[in-house]
Image (spheres, helix red, strand yellow):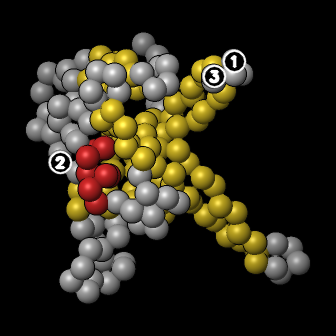
Amino acid sequence: MSRSLNKAMIIGNLGSDPEVRSTASGTRVATLSVATSRSWTNQSGERQEKTEWHRVVLWNSKFRQLADVAEKYLKKGDRVYVEGRIEYRTWEDREGKTRYSTEINANEMVMLTPRGGGEDSDSAVTRRAPQPAVADSAAESYNDFPEALDEEEDDLPF
């Protein structure tokens, strides 16, 4: 049997407040714009920096309320850890043009920006989205924007 892996992990800062919507079926979804940066010194000794922007999608499910957590606690500039899978979408806009999007469909989000109490900015994680007692039985995904289809995953026997 052939196995594969699609996993993305990023730590970065929000470029804007989360955008939260509900699908036609009532499932809430949040979209984040997360910036990651890297820096280096070129051959001339000049400091260089490159910032990448990542579109992150957080869904509410029966085990995790990631969209609600993002809406309640995240704001522009906050630092987050996001883990999920990379997805590519294609759709037609209102003018009939084909559009493409690359997203991280998150199944884990950890807030890294301290809240109040005068904590140090490098302190440990302050809030974590609720953790399930068992593996999620379904993970949501965009298929046709903004509608969503559920993907079934096998339940683990332990």
Residue 146 vertical position relative to residue 28 in the rendered view, above or below: above
Secondary element at tag 2? loop
Would you say residue 106 is visible in this rendering? no
Residue 70 x/y as whole percent:
32, 52
Verify CB contact (< 8 Å) between mark 2 and mark 1. no
- Do the CB atoms of the residues marked 3 and 1 lie less than 8 Å apart? yes
Instruction: Identify the amino acid type marked 2.
Output: Pro
Instruction: Give the numbered dot on residue 94.
Output: 3
Q: CA distance from mark 3 to mark 1?
A: 5 Å
x 43%, y 40%: residue: 57
Q: Residues within 10 Å of mark 2 (few under 14, many from 20)?
A: few
- Nearer to the camera, 18 or 157: 18
| Mark 1 crowd level (few <14, some 14–19, many ≥20, 10 Å Cα) | few
In this view of the protein, which residue sits in the foreground, 103 or 145? 145
Name the residue at 51% across, 55% down.
Answer: 34
Numbered marks: total? 3
Q: Which residue is mark 1?
A: 96
Q: Which residue is mark 2?
A: 130
Kindly report which numbered mark, 2 or 1, lies closer to the viewer in this rendering: 1
Q: Quadrant of residue 62?
A: top left
